[in-house]
Amino acid sequence: MDHVTTNPKRRRKNRTALVVGLSLGGGFLVGGVVLIIWLASIGRKRKDGDEEDNQGFSEYIDDEFERGAGPKRFSYKELVVATNDFNDDQKLGQGGSGGVYKGFLRETNS
């Protein structure tokens, strides 16, 4: 007979270690899942808030255009004339949305 498996003290000690190990592991697993869900919800709230801020800004700019108090919109034809058909000699550099050109507008009505 094997004395290790039949010893009640040893069996109780192994069972206690198993219960403690599984409890701690399960607790860390649940805590990690809760943390991930919480962080995801914070990111979603920030994204939604940014979209609302951009929406408000777009409406503000549109109102400014309508009142004539904000920046002026130029037609593509006006920009072609002002930049000499987007001539490379008029190019100042490259921006995030494309080329940046120097141009002169005939009339701004400001």
Image (cartoon, rainbow, N blue to C red):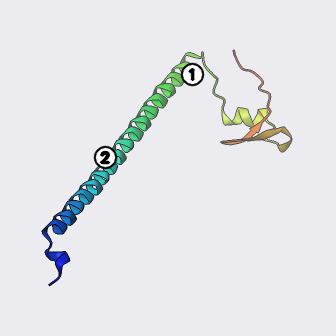
Q: Residue 58's x, y, as percent?
A: 51, 28
Checking the image for residue 6, the label placed there is none
67 sits left or right of 97 in the view: left
What kind of residue is marked 1? Phe
Q: Residues within 10 Å of mark 1 (few under 14, many from 20)?
A: some
Q: Nearer the viewer, residue 21 or 43?
A: 21
Q: Residue furthest right?
A: 89
Q: Is residue 74 above or below residue 22?
A: above
Q: Nearer the viewer, residue 25 or 110?
A: 25
Checking the image for residue 34, the label placed there is 2
In the rendered image, is residue 85 in sight? no
Name the residue beneath numbered marker 1.
65
**Earlier sequence position, callout 2 versus callout 1:** 2
What kind of residue is marked 2? Val
Q: Residue at the spot x=55%, y=16% of the render?
A: 67
70 sits left or right of 22 in the view: right
Query: In which quadrant is the N terminus drawn?
Result: bottom left
Q: Residue at the spot x=46%, y=28% of the render?
A: 53
Dividing the picture into quarters, in which one does residue 86 lie? top right
Q: Residue 60's x, y, as percent?
A: 51, 22
In the rendered image, is residue 34 in sight? yes
Q: Residue 63's x, y, as percent?
A: 51, 20
85 sits left or right of 35 in the view: right
